[in-house]
């Protein structure tokens, strides 16, 4: 088999070069993406992402592919020279994060202003998407909500990955969808917190001096690496650079130290739940009072209108 000559240097775009080389060996051996996926115990979409350089192939899978495709170690040698620490910043940045999330064996999350997607109930997710760029697009909101709930399944399984979440108090106080939706979301948080693999803590407003200034996620991967993910205004940033990971881990540890203990955190969520229940009852009473007022106004209007004599029946 003809072998490509590999350039012995590190480049920030070398992930695409590795993907091209993987595709070259796959096609040379006559395998389709579907066939290779089955042999590697993966999926065809994963192979597509590996070959496009949009996803890092796990090292053990690289060695399997080397043998299956007769690459004689070329794939592993190229994989070792790829700058996998290069920060991911491209249009499909969120899909990259979702792909890694689907393989993660653990996640540590700090979240500001909004409940993290892995902990959102359906009603809350729909309310969040309703004030996003999907506003006024029911089908898009439905699709995005379904995708978000699908991401939760492996984490909200008692045997699922470890999920450690620190919610800034702003996340449970910021209202999306009204008090009824927030009541349902608080109930959902309390239910999820009972899972053996999930720990939810709240960092109260008074501890802001030690809190991170933006949301972040640290994903523990099967190969032992840790990926840090955060978002700026219009894009996401993912990196497994040891220096970046260490800095974010320090920030997370500071936030953890400032957060309330689990029992106190759940008590605060329960308190928020009671507040939203009161708000919902108050809103319901206000609606009833308004409806009664409108009915009374309609009756008075009818009584004050011109009288129309009824025709008398003829004898």
Image (tube, rainbow, N blue to C red):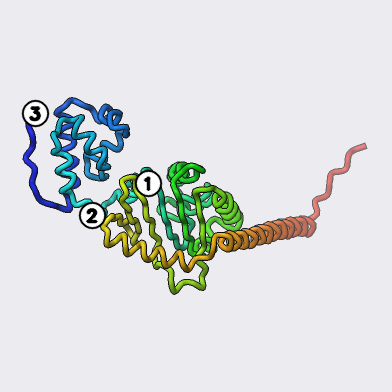
Q: In this figure, which residue is indicated by the disc labeled 2?
A: 85
Q: Residue at x 45, y 49 (%)?
A: 162
* Badge 1 or badge 3: first in the primary sequence: 3
- As drawn, 61 above or below 117: above
Q: Position of residue 261 (x, y in %)?
A: 54, 63
Q: Is residue 188 left or right of residue 242?
A: right
Disc 2 to disc 1: CB gap under 8 Å: no
Q: Position of residue 121 (x, y in %)?
A: 53, 49
Q: In this figure, which residue is indicated by the disc labeled 3?
A: 1
C-alpha distance separating marks 2 and 1 = 18 Å
C-alpha distance separating marks 1 and 3 = 36 Å
Quarter of the image where one finds residue 108: bottom left
- Is residue 193 among what the camera can see? yes
Q: Is residue 209 left or right of residue 191?
A: left
Crowd band around label 2 with a 10 angstrom C-alpha radius: few (<14), some (14–19), many (20+):
some
C-alpha distance separating marks 3 and 2 = 32 Å
Q: Residue at x 43, y 55 (%)?
A: 132
Disc 1 to disc 3: CB gap under 8 Å: no
Q: Residue at x 44, y 46 (%)?
A: 161
- As drawn, 222 above or below 257: above
């Amino acid at each position: 088999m003809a072998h490509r000559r590999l350039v012995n240097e590190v480049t920030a775009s070398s992930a695409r070069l590795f993907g091209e080389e993987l595709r070259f060996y796959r096609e040379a051996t006559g395998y389709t993406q579907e066939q290779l996926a089955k042999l590697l115990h993966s999926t065809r979409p994963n192979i597509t992402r590996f070959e496009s350089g949009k996803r890092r192939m796990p090292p053990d899978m690289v060695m399997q592919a080397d043998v299956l495709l007769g690459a004689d170690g070329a794939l592993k040698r190229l994989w070792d020279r790829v700058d996998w620490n290069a920060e991911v910043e491209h249009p499909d940045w969120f899909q990259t994060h979702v792909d890694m999330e689907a393989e993660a064996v653990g996640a540590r999350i700090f979240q500001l202003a909004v409940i993290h997607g892995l902990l959102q109930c359906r009603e809350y997710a729909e309310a969040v998407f309703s004030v996003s760029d999907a506003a006024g697009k029911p089908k898009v909101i439905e699709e995005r909500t379904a995708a978000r709930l699908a991401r939760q399944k492996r984490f909200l399984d008692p045997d699922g990955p470890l999920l450690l979440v620190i919610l800034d108090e702003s996340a449970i106080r910021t209202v999306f969808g009204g008090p009824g939706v927030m009541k349902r979301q608080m109930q959902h948080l309390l239910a999820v917190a009972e899972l053996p693999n999930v720990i939810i803590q709240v960092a109260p407003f008074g501890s802001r001096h030690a809190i991170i200034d933006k949301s972040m996620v640290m994903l523990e991967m099967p190969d032992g690496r840790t990926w840090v993910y955060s978002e700026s205004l219009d894009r996401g940033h993912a990196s497994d650079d040891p220096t970046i990971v260490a800095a974010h881990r320090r920030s997370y540890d500071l936030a953890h130290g400032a957060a309330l203990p689990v029992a106190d955190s759940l008590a605060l969520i329960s308190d928020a739940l009671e507040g939203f229940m009161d708000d919902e009852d108050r809103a319901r009473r206000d609606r009833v009072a308004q409806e009664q007022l409108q009915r009374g106004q309609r009756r008075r209007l009818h009584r004050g209108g011109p009288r129309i004599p009824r025709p008398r029946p003829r004898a």
